[in-house]
Image: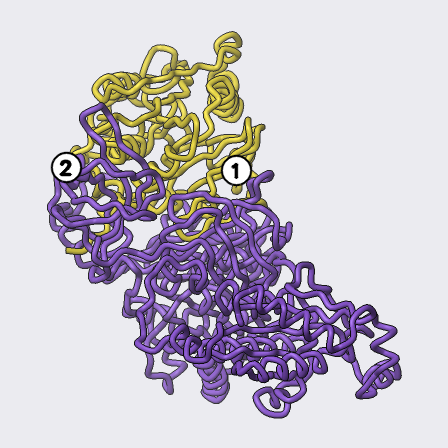
Chain colours: A purple, B yellow
Amino acid sequence: MGQPQVQVDLEAELAEQERVGLLRFITCGSVDDGKSSLIGRLLYESKLLYTDQLEVLEADSKKVGTRGGELDFALLVDGLAAEREQGITIDVAYRFFATDRRRFIVADTPGHEQYTRNMVTGASMSEAAVILCDARKGVLTQTRRHAHLVSLLGIKHVALAINKLDLVDYSQDVFDKISEDFKAFAHDIGIHDVACVPMSAVFGDNVVTSSDRTPWYQGPTLLGWLENVELTRDEEDLSGPARLLVQWVNRPNSEFRGFSGRVLAGVLRKGDRVRALPGEAESTIERIVTMDGDLDEAVVGASVTVVLSDEIDVSRGSVIAVADEPADVANAFQAHIVGMDAHDLVPGRHYLAKIGARTVGFTADHPKYRIDVDTGAHLPAKTIGLNEIAVANVHFDVPVAYEEFKRSRDLGSFIVLDRLSNATLGAGMIDFALRRSANVTWQALTVDKQARAAQKGHQPAVVWFTGLSGAGKSTVADLVEKQLHAQGKHTFVLDGDNVRHGLSKDLGFTDADRVENIRRIAEVASLMVDAGLIVLVSFISPFQAERDQARELVAEGEFCEVFIDTPLDVAERRDPKGLYAKARRGDLTNFTGVDSEYERPETPEVHVDTTQLDPEQAASAVVAKLRDMGVI
Amino acid sequence: MKLNHLDRLEAESIDIFREAVAESERPALLYSIGKDSSVLVHLARKAFYPSTPPFPLVHVDTTWKFREMIEFRDRTAAELGMELIVHKNPDCIAQGINPFDHGSAVHTDMWKTQGLRQILDKQKFDAVFGGARRDEEASRAKERVFSFRSAQHRWDPKNQRPELWRLYNTRTAPGESVRVFPLSNWTELDIWHYIHRENIPIVPLYFAKERPVVDRDGTLIMVDDDRMPLAEGEKPEMKMVRFRTLGCYPLTGAVESSAATLPEIVSEMRAATTSERQGRVIDRDQSGSMERKKQEGYF
């Protein structure tokens, strides 16, 4: 080896690091799209392979390579013996390379379906994504799935690497067609920064250097794109309100009590007035302590220890936030949850959730819907299984400081843990806190719901009639409205059939459409409650999850669920619209009670057994309940 | 001003240290005495300052380490005021296991892998810090920051816990443990830059000096004591050498070098055409060998 030729100036190198940014990105693609080959080539071309690694690569290429003895870059990346034998990547692998402009950490994530959880894992720390597709196949279901997941995880910058262009003779037409398809789709799902790169990872076209086989392409190479994509990580933003997540209480002796943790947002300064969340207690930052000496300020990303000027209640998991802009605190949220384990996440079961630096009790409600990641469609779901993504309301057993996921990955994400196996069952992203739990003061509008209700002499409410078709819902609802109207109350009936003629006329009767129909009706009912009305909703609404969803859109005490309980044979005998007969003939599918389930309400506010009560008696029972609830 | 690259790596490592300590009953730092261990200990001090890191240093001693490593180890622990637990596998002592008579595979398995399991079982550590980096080796690239181990200390690469955001699942049942790798996202160059910036002491063997070596199948082995059997007529030669990685002296190849300062080492690394672990005999038995060792409980 001998004398080093060029003496490195380490001080200069360190100074240089000041302006070299770090980009974390993920690569995803279908099994044979050439992902590992691409990463192998990036490592190879950025001259980061050593001779001995090349020797192993050459030997392995001959032994198990798929390129007829030529260098098989995929072998560099496929680290685990098990997957070498299968010829596929089975887990997330992290790779490092650097150019003069940037350092990179690549999360290499598998493309096939059963490992969606790994892609979500890799995407969780990434700020850009490279999605590969095969030029011969175009935008596949898998490509759309990857784009959906990337969008869900909050990644804003996506490159579509249209690979294997050598196999379509470097055709511009093929490239243009795929680009257009993908850009239109990406735009629809909220990804606005999209670059499409024509590529051959195996031959190196447009990976690091521009290819002369694609003279029609003027855009950046893939590496060029990676070097220039905007860094948008939370850590790049110094402007947000300061938050410090307390991980550990530092007490070396009785004289010192510090709170060690990481600045998740903004800049925390000595002398800042701060609040310890959850809670109301305030104090002032007296010192920011590090082993290298005290600091005047700690910027986002820094791990420090702070000392407060007062003895206030702060422990592991507390969030120290600037007092004039504290984070919100709540214990119930709507969240997106990804199933991460072979065991389903079951609604109502007691789990643990880790959010920030706290581990708390956790339950999820029935999913409102799950998302078909191939199409974006909303489907009904009872549990959250492996690789499924669902939207559900979730409850923590204590209030926690949080931010919505779209504002902060660190304070807006959580993982769900099984109490017995300790497995990570789910990964959650907070959409928003549920209204009834939010510990925030809403901006008081001059004329608010209460003011409108006061004018009408009653409290607004949703009276939700559920039951089989032909049970008598509309009949009872109509009688209730008559009684209320006679008392001078301001009412409105939302009838399932009527709504389908207008607001929901674009919807059919698939499960996904039914979920959407209910969502719309529930939202409309909620708006009417804001307007101060008593809203009577008459709707089969067979699933508890959807009825709960409607309930959660209004405040506690504003929802009265009325179960019109008529036995199936009785309802079928009545058959006022002739629908049962049609369903029995098979002319009508997905008909509740015939070939689609009706989930009986477990704890309705009013349970009307129509074999015991006539419609007038039933209506009186509902009105009596509304009086009990203080609505009228 | 924003954090720079090394600041961010440092902050992330500190975050990992604090998280592991807050969520475990009995943490420990597996101290290998190499440069990565030096960085690891430095970061642990920063993570808990002004407290002393609330865990012991654990060294699994094979009795075949370079003498300078042992001196450095004892001095470091004394200076930092940290408890040092040294474990030597008593079975190996009884059987006189050594790399010359038993080969590198048996030697490594018995002293290191079995020795580590013994001390972990005995001390019931539930979180053990190690200095592994993802850029070191292919199977390391797939390891989590918090890497779960069964009660038998096995690593199951196909059944790793998903690791999302900065939310580490640290939970273990009795007998189980997690290996924690705060340096996961560092590269070798980062390590050298950081040693320079922070002025972190490292074992002098990393710097070139005249040392007595013999040439064994193209690998330069330093004759560190008189236990090294010499072939007939074989005579140790004094050569300017240094080590890029440290382990058992009979299993660690020296490189000829004149790099006696950090800048010289980094310069040499730039020009180097062999990767860091290449000096280690164990990795190259066959490809995929590190993965196999890890499944069996090697760190």
Q: Are marks 1 and 2 on the same chain?
A: no
**Residue to which mark 1 is pinned:** B289
Residue drawn where x is 21% and y is 43% of the image? B193
Q: Amino acid type of disc 1?
A: Ser
Left-right relation of A437 to A551: left
Q: Residues within 10 Å of mark 2 (few under 14, many from 20)?
A: few
Q: Residue furthest top?
A: B94
Check the picture and name the quadrant holding the N terminus of chain A.
top left
Q: Residue furthest bottom?
A: A501
Element assignment for label 2: loop
Task: Tell me which corner region of the image, top left, top right, bottom left or bottom right, holds residue A585.
Answer: bottom right
Left-right relation of B192 to A146: left
Element assignment for label 1: helix
Residue drawn where x is 61% and y is 87% of the image? A499
Residue drawn where x is 23% and y is 29% of the image? B202
Q: Is residue A257 above or below residue A435?
A: above
**Residue to which mark 2 is pinned:** A292
Residue drawn where x is 22% and y is 26% of the image? B204
Task: Tell me which corner region of the image, top left, top right, bottom left or bottom right, holds residue A513.
Answer: bottom right
